[in-house]
Image (cartoon, rainbow, N blue to C red):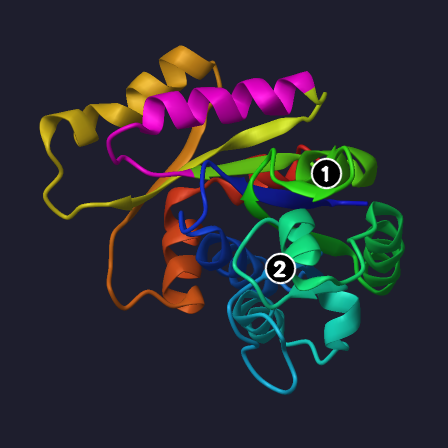
């Protein structure tokens, strides 16, 4: 199934905005894009229609009205890893098998699928299973979202190592939230990440307080060679 799995070096790194921006950019090319957030957690439900705010943004970018239960089969009202959240709340633990069934349902309806992970690639989503196992089973190339903030070299290298240990195909890295006036260290971070990891940096997205998926999508259209990226499928 053509598509990408969007992961990050940490929570709050901007996965949802990059994923939804990529969805928007693909939609501009008349590509039929399905979206999914298999596992999500938060301290409260976003709305009656969408439990997760991330799912709402992805669905809006994709212009889909598919049921929340298909787009986001596992949601826990506790900001923690899905496995921990289920234990704390005394709820049924997430099932990787059920999440895969939901993915295949989404994939059957669309030509292309963008799946957003949760937290980083090693977040536990079931007993002895991490979100990276989901990406491996659905066989989607991975795009890693990181940032230029202090510690990013360590976090990015660890994420790349984890992806490789799981046998995942890394399509590239996107550096998000680059300051308008970056420091020397921040400015040199993209090149350093490429040199250390051996993975290409697809784009450097600038920081903005008012980001939305269409604005991010326009930046992606401008900065990323989408033809080359899509040729990996």
15 sits left or right of 98 in the view? left
Residue located at (63% from left, 18% from top): 164
Q: Is residue 132 magenta?
A: no
Quarter of the picture containing the N terminus is top right
Residue 40's label in the rendered image is 2
Q: Residue 135's mark?
A: 1
Dominant SS of magenta comes to helix
Q: Which residue is at a point 38% across and 50% down the rendered structure image? A: 222
Badge 1 local density, few (<14 within 10 Å), some, or many (20+)?
Answer: many
Q: Is residue 117 left or right of residue 151?
A: right
Q: Quadrant of residue 126?
A: top right
Viewer-side residue, 35 vs 98: 98
Q: Quadrant of residue 142?
A: top right
Q: Are marks 1 and 2 in contact (CB under 8 Å)?
A: no
Tag in front: 1 or 2 = 2
SS of the residue under disc 1: helix
Q: Nearer the viewer, residue 7 or 87?
A: 87
* Secondary structure under the numbered disc 2 in the rendered image: strand
Q: Is residue 184 above or below residue 67?
A: above
Q: Is residue 45 left or right of residue 196?
A: right
Q: Position of residue 36 (x, y in %)?
A: 69, 60
Q: Is residue 104 visible?
A: yes
Q: Which residues are magenta?
A: 146-165
Q: Does 127 sit left or right of 209 as displayed?
A: right
In the rendered structure, which disc, 1 or 2, sits on the residue that comes first in sequence? 2
Residue 223, quarter of picture: top left
Q: Is residue 151 magenta?
A: yes
Screen quadrant of the C terminus: top right
Q: Residue at x 55, y 53 (%)?
A: 80
């Amino acid at each position: 199934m053509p598509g990408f799995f969007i992961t990050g070096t940490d929570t709050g790194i901007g996965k949802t905005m990059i994923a939804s921006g990529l969805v928007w950019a693909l939609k501009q090319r008349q590509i039929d894009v399905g979206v999914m957030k298999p596992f999500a957690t938060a301290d409260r439900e976003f709305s009656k229609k969408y439990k997760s705010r991330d799912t709402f943004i992805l669905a809006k970018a994709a212009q889909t009205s598919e049921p929340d239960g298909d787009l986001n089969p596992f949601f826990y009202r506790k900001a923690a890893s899905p496995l921990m959240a289920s234990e704390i709340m005394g709820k049924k633990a997430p099932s990787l098998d059920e999440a895969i069934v939901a993915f295949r349902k989404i994939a059957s309806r669309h030509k292309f699928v963008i799946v957003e992970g949760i937290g980083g690639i090693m977040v536990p989503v079931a007993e002895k299973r991490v979100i990276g196992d989901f990406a491996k089973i659905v066989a989607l190339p991975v795009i890693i979202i990181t940032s230029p903030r202090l510690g990013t070299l360590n976090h990015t290298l660890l994420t790349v190592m984890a992806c490789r240990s799981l046998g995942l195909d890394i399509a590239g890295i996107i550096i998000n939230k680059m300051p308008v006036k970056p420091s020397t260290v921040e400015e040199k971070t993209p090149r350093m990440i490429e040199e250390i990891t051996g993975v290409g940096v697809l784009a450097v997205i600038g920081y903005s307080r008012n980001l939305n998926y269409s604005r991010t999508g326009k930046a992606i259209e401008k900065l990323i060679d989408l033809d080359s990226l899509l040729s990996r499928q």
